[in-house]
Amino acid sequence: MNMFDRAKPYNELPLLPPDINLEHNELLKEAIQANKSLAELKGVAQTIPNQTMLVNTLPLQEARLSSEIENVLTTNDLLYEAMASTKNNYDPQTKEVLRYREALWEGYNELKKNDLLTTNLIVRLYQKIKNTNAGIRNTPGTKISNSKGETVYTPPEGENIIRDKLKNLEDFIHNDQDTIDPLIKLAVIHYQFEAIHPFTDGNGRTGRIINILYIIQQKLLDLPVIYLSRYVIENKNEYYKLLRNVTEKYDWIPWINYILKGLNNTATDTINKIIEIRKLFESTLDEMKIKLSSRVYSKELIELLFMQPYCKVEYVVNAGIVKRQTAAEYLKEIEKTGLLKSKKVGKEVLYLNVRLLEILEK
């Protein structure tokens, strides 16, 4: 019997694995399709000639959209500009989204070294996102409220209780003896983390980074290029309703189905975006070969313009293509073709690959 009471700390949150049939036919059917789409995404991502093109662009989309779910708002243009610029007086929302990206990469690099998703790593992700030294909640009073101010959920209280539930979550993540499909397992992991709600703030964003890292840990993707947050934004009311239904009614199947459909939908969207980027890069190579002098044109330089939407002289120099003065001349000449658009930011001149940004903003 579920003893859940919205107004009381849910210290009785059941441990994992959940007491349901996770090999339900409906779930397995959705899981097969989602796995297939992720496998296709993994393959398509490998067709990009330089993986940095994806590494510097798509994870920032996830950072922006995941933050948008928590009403931390900024624009694509501002984010990519801030990533390229040395100027540091950007608004707090933009800085917070950039920290999300840093947290995602910190988690990715740690996973590559240790292949473990631990409580300590999760705490570090949260600290990076929120720019804080705080850790697991150790004071009472945390409540989740709706837009009317009504309490809809009170997470577990007491640091020891929270840590015990996180340890159980860790054990569930790393149990390679079970036969649960990894994407079904991901849906269970995501619910449980959000229900534990171990931090005073930033739980949603931390949980969505855990999703991406788990997919990579399971070797379903090589790079963090999927952004499930777009699907959550488009189906936000359903996301929170289904989360609550697991808590209040132990109704797992619709929640897991939602996540599986989201993964399938998101993987398909990302495949299309990567194909668009690849086609744009290839057509730009052909176009610039015609429009630029042989002195300026090189595949390495055009490739650099696709590493992220904004380029600058320093990037060209650091790539070892040409020296500073020549780099400035080259970028100005490329701007004349219409491929780039210059913008003064502080003391720097940044050059925007307009068509690349248009693809990323779709």
Image (cartoon, rainbow, N blue to C red):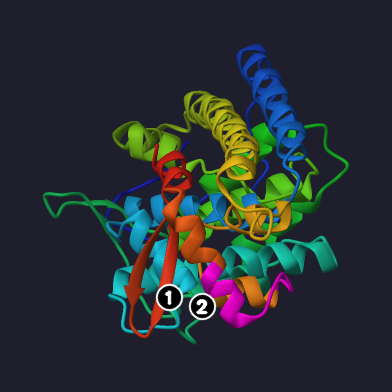
From the image, which quarter does the C terminus lie in?
Answer: top left
Q: Amino acid at mark 1?
A: Lys
Indicate whether 240 appears above or below 339: above
- Tell me if 72 is positioned left or right of 146 in this view: right
Tell me where residue 187 appears, x and y as whole percent.
Answer: 58, 38
Residue under pointer 2: 127
Tell which of 57 and 256 is nearer to you: 57
Residue under pointer 1: 130
Q: Residues within 10 Å of mark 1 (few under 14, many from 20)?
A: some
Tell me where residue 17 appears, x and y as whole percent.
Answer: 68, 41
- Tell me, yes or no, whether the two marked residues, 2 and 1, touch with CB atoms within 8 Å: yes
Indicate whether 261 appears above or below 57: above
Residue furthest right in the image: 177
Tell me where residue 72 appears, x and y as whole percent.
Answer: 30, 61
The residue range painted magenta reads 319-329
Tell which of 346 and 43 is nearer to you: 346
- How many numbered marks appear? 2
Q: Residues within 10 Å of mark 2 (few under 14, many from 20)?
A: many
Q: Give the residue displayed 11% in from the left and 49% down from the top.
A: 148
Q: Is residue 291 magenta?
A: no
Q: Give the residue displayed 47% in from the left and 51% down from the top.
A: 61
Q: CA distance from mark 2 to mark 1?
A: 5 Å
- Tell me if 133 is positioned left or right of 188 in this view: left
Residue furthest left in the image: 148
Q: Give the residue displayed 54% in from the left and 58% down from the top.
A: 308
Q: Quadrant of residue 300?
A: bottom right
Q: Amino acid at mark 2?
A: Gln
Does residue 141 appear in the picture of this structure? Answer: no
Q: Secondary structure at mark 1?
A: helix
